[in-house]
Amino acid sequence: MDGRCARCWSPKNLVNHEVDASPRADPTVRREKVLLCKHCGDSAPLDALLFWEVYMRFGSTRELLQHYGAESEELALQKLCMERGLNEREVLRRARGQQSAEALNNAVKKANAFLTYASPYGYDYVNGILQVRQDEARVVSLIFRRYLEGKGIAKICQELNRDGYRTKTGRAWASQTIANILSNPVYCGLARLNGGIKRGKHERLIEIDTFNRVQNEMQRRIRRPDQRKTEAPQLRLEDYVD
């Protein structure tokens, strides 16, 4: 089968995924076939509105949050509804699983697998708390180690993709994804809250000293002086209390 996944652009393991047609498109068309890779097809929500308006437009919850500059999933969905002229209450109801028991057992469960939490790579949310995912945690450690060994972000991407590693959504690694990991304090056992940082309840994957060294190195590698900060921000665990 020729072509690429319509969601993640992967050329591998492609299937014709049959879904309900978009409720905002031609009402005479009831079902459509969408070319997806197996991973995207297996992860797709059954709810047609969520499939077309959210799942097919964004590769991950993180991408959804970044696109709308929102701190929470609910705020991002509210902005999406305003932009697309959607019924906000209906979209949130579907996304949060406030439907009937029958719907909860099929469409919402699959939708929430995509929408419920933006789990950082290296962790999974379990009962609202980040738990280490060992296979991903090893990749996080590798990324930090390779960067401090002198490898550039693009080279790290090439290595991960060459060795068959994939992101949380099953996509190939991109430079921005690596940069996000290298600058995320969550890996030091910290958490972002209301624009600030606090000590989290999860296990750290990276020592604060290692994280700070990476921030210094990232600043050093910026070529344009006007984009370089005088001093890279440094973290100290004692500055963050429970």
Image: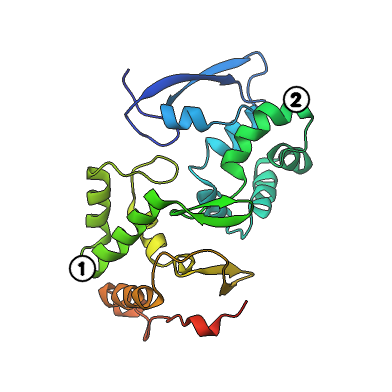
Which element type, helix, strand or loop, lies under badge 1?
loop
Residue lying at 27% horizontally and 65% vertically, measured from the top left:
145
The amino acid at mark 1 is Glu
Viewer-nearest residue: 196 or 63: 196
Mark carried by residue 66: none
Q: Quadrant of residue 72?
A: bottom right
User: How is colour applied across the structure in the image?
Assistant: rainbow
Q: Mark 2 or mark 1: name the one nearer the start of the chain.
A: 2
Up-down relation of residue 67 to residue 113 (above or below): below
Q: Position of residue 103 (x, y in %)?
A: 73, 27
Viewer-nearest residue: 55 or 161: 161
Residue lying at 65% horizontally and 41% vertically, measured from the top left:
84
Q: Residues within 10 Å of mark 2 (few under 14, many from 20)?
A: few
Up-down relation of residue 75 to residue 198 (above or below): above
Q: Position of residue 193 (x, y in %)?
A: 62, 69
Residue annotated with mark 1: 149
On the rendered image, what quadrant is the N terminus found in? top left
Up-down relation of residue 139 to residue 96 (above or below): below
On the rendered image, what quadrant is the C terminus found in? bottom right
Up-down relation of residue 104 to residue 196 (above or below): above
Residue lying at 69% horizontally and 44% vertically, measured from the top left:
81
Residue annotated with mark 2: 102
Viewer-nearest residue: 240 or 114: 240
Residue lying at 45% horizontally and 70% vertically, measured from the top left:
188
Q: Quadrant of residue 28?
A: top right
The amino acid at mark 2 is Glu
Q: Is residue 118 visible?
A: no
Q: Residues within 10 Å of mark 1 (few under 14, many from 20)?
A: few
